[in-house]
Amino acid sequence: MKHVNRKGTYSVKTDALKKYFGKDNLIPLWVADMDFETPQCVREALEEALKGGVYGYNFIPDNYFPTIVQWLKEKQKWEVEQQWLTFIPGIVKGIGYAINFFTEEGDGIIVQPPVYPPFINVPKGNDRKLVFNPLIRVEDENGGTYRMDFDNLRKIGESGECSMLILSNPHNPGGIAWDYDTLKELAEICHKYEILVVSDEIHADMPLFGTEHIPFASVSKEAARNSITFGAPSKTFNMAGIVSSFAVVPNEELREPFYRWMRVNELSSPTIFATLGAIAAYTKGDGWRMKMLDYIEGNVVYVENFCKDSLQGLIKPVRPMSSFLIWLDCRELCKKMFGCVDQQQLVELFINRAGLALNDGAAFGQGGEGYMRLNVGCGLEVLEEAMNNLKTAIDEY
Ligand SMILES: Cc1ncc(COP(=O)(O)O)c(C=O)c1O
């Protein structure tokens, strides 16, 4: 994989360190994009569009939606119809649209922390009532995983105060690719209590270590009838700045009014780059994707081995089943170093002592304390330097 030095390119990951961490000279291992050069096919498609020399209004190319249909069928074994799809300019925006269209101020929205911070911030910012159904931590010597708390979810359903649940599938953080039984049970409960599921599947196309992604809407009739799915090539092909995502809504009763609202407000109109980049990625980018996933697996194994061999297992990485983000369980390290799980001191250790910019676990809500999120979408040599710096900081403490 070709790594690109992104300093000086307005990249949030490298150039906004001072703003978010208070200093510049940190190894950037936070924002969820990769340091790998975007696939050549995508760059060529964008260059071709640039060469045109006029950047006026364009319509969506005829092969845009068929390309997505084909991709979902081939890679996710999910048969979707073309009319179920629309373009959306980014998944967080899509979540915001769904919240604004399907819920009212004060309505309850369920999220399952620890979770990607905008799942908390977007409902909150829109004056919805956040209702938490925290994930249950499942521990084992290999880093463990999480499961959903269905007993609690049923109780929330009984209360009747929630009309939407935002699902991260695969789940960020942790990279948990939810299994069929989990998704089916979730679909049954949400259908029974009339809770619309918004499934964010942005990390779907980066399965690791033999995992298979299961789209939420594909698990049952209830799931298809009661869901809005968002997908994108943006994370997978390292093109988040192009802002190219799509929605899939199988149920016409949900879809027609929602898509009409987006259409009349021109919320589902792409730039020419968004569609051309996506078509190129989905038709010609698979070789790059496979190489990238191979490289990421190597990086994950490196971090796992380093934690075991050089940090005496005091940090336990939750092995991601998908994507390039590792959720580091640092609770043992905290107890050993600080006598308790002290998030402030943990963040201080990573940022100020080790010089590493990772995401603070506390930003992911309940259950995030004692954790840090590490982005391994970078060169192995960067990761080696980072892990060695961390070890030195721990040893010197
Ligand atoms: C689960 C999840 N959803 C959405 C996004 C962002 O998507 P977008 O840039 O399309 O809004 C991210 C980025 O990290 C993510 O991890």
Image (tube, helix red, strand yellow):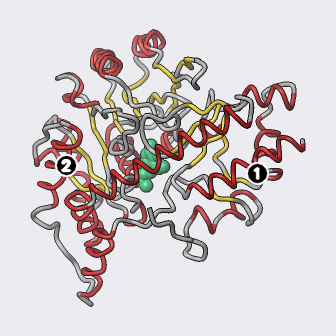
State the residue in front, 16 or 158.
Answer: 16
Residue closest to the eye, 379 or 186:
379
The numbered mark at residue 330 is none
Inspect this view and state whether residue 362 appears: no
Q: Quadrant of residue 381?
A: bottom right
Going by the image, does 391 lie left or right of 291?
Answer: right
The correct choice, above or below, for 149 with respect to 233 in the image is above
Badge 2 marks a residue whose secondary structure is helix
User: Percent x, y for residue 74?
Assistant: 17, 43
Outermost residue toward the right in this view: 397
Q: Is residue 287 left or right of residue 348?
A: left
Mark 1 lies on residue: 389
Q: Position of residue 39 (x, y in %)?
A: 35, 65
The part of the image, by quadrant, that contains residue 178 is top left
CB of residue at label 1: within 8 Å of ligand 1?
A: no
Cα–Cα span, label 2 and label 1? 41 Å
The reply, left or right, for residue 48 in relation to residue 174 is left
Q: Is residue 236 visible?
A: yes
Between marks 2 and 1 in the image, the one whose residue lies nearer the viewer: 1
Decide which of tag 2 and tag 1 comes sooner along the chain: 2
Q: Residue at x 83, y 27 (%)?
A: 336
> Secondary structure beneath disc 1?
helix
User: Which of the two residues, 291 or 83, is positioned nearer the viewer here?
Assistant: 291
Callout 2 environment at 10 Å: few (<14), some (14 to 19), or many (20+)? some
Relative to 63, residue 197 above or below = above
Q: Amino acid at mark 1?
A: Asn
- 89 or 382: nearer the eye? 382
The answer to whether the beta carbon of the residue marked 2 is less than 8 Å from any atom of ligand 1 is: no
Q: Residue at x 40, y 35 (%)?
A: 209
Q: Which residue is mark 2?
A: 71
| Residue drawn at the location 40% of the way across and 29% of the way down | 165
